[in-house]
Amino acid sequence: MQNEFKIERLDNQNCEAIIGLILPIQQIEFNVDIDLAAQPDLLDIETNYDGTGGAFWGAKLNGELIGTIALIAQSEHHSGAIRKMFVKKEFRGKELGVAQALFKTLLDYCRDNNLNGVYLGTKDILQAACRFYERNGFKQVAMENLPVYFPRMAVDNVFYGLDLKSV
């Protein structure tokens, strides 16, 4: 089928495509005040994600990167931080299921690697993202109740956690 996308692990060879997907969504579509300098992890996927025991995945359709999700593993705490979940506007929604497939890939990886929980930060203006996380079992967590090891981004103001033993 022409509209079938595939999910694959991404590495440093994909940095340019990843940046080309994420920055316009952040800056133009959602007017989030963040630039590449505030996200140096995007310039070295292998160190910042794979190097933690996590991973960075992309959804591709006909060779085009249409979505991403990443995990920073905190193996010593049996948990991880979800990062960089973005899907191009024209590929969002239940019809294609890109976000859900990316999310399932990450959760399967967590289970296979004995991670029992994941946390994430986002912005309250990203209402569709917040609804997506809530539909997938995430519970909102007050910033002061986040684990001390959770790597927070300065722009995030809403936080979620998911106990993988309960889903």
Image: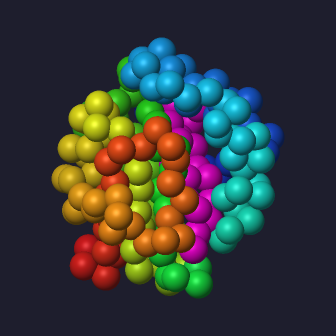
Quarter where residue 39 is shown? top right
Residue 21 visible from this viewpoint:
no
Q: Position of residue 155 (x, y in %)?
A: 46, 38
Residue 149 visible from this viewpoint:
yes
Q: Quadrant of the C terminus?
A: bottom left
Relative to the observer, which residue lies in front, 48 or 62?
A: 48
Q: Position of residue 40 (x, y in %)?
A: 71, 41
The colour mode here is rainbow
User: Could you tell me which residue is drawn at 31 percent across and 75 percent down?
Assistant: 163
Specify whether residue 95 is painted magenta: no
Residue that sits furthest to the front in the current view? 144
User: Could you tell me which residue is drawn at 67 percent across and 30 percent down?
Assistant: 36
- Looking at the image, residue 40 sits to the left or right of residue 147; the answer is right
User: Could you tell me which residue is drawn at 74 percent across and 65 percent down?
Assistant: 51
- Looking at the image, residue 167 sits to the left or right of residue 73; the answer is left
Residue that sits furthest to the top in the current view? 28
Specify whether residue 56 is painted magenta: yes
Is 151 drawn above or below residue 157 in the view shown? below
User: Could you tell me which residue is drawn at 35 percent across and 38 percent down?
Assistant: 123
- Looking at the image, residue 29 sits to the left or right of residue 164; the answer is right
Q: Position of residue 53 (x, y in %)?
A: 66, 71
Q: Quadrant of the N terminus?
A: top left
Relative to the observer, which residue lies in front, 141 or 107?
A: 141
Q: Main secondary structure of the magenta part?
A: strand
Q: Position of residue 49 (x, y in %)?
A: 67, 58
Relative to the observer, which residue lies in front, 89 or 162?
A: 162
Magenta stretch bounds: 54-74
Is 160 drawn above or below residue 26 in the view shown? below
Is 130 drawn above or below residue 105 in the view shown? above
- Looking at the image, residue 2 sits to the left or right of residue 130; the answer is right
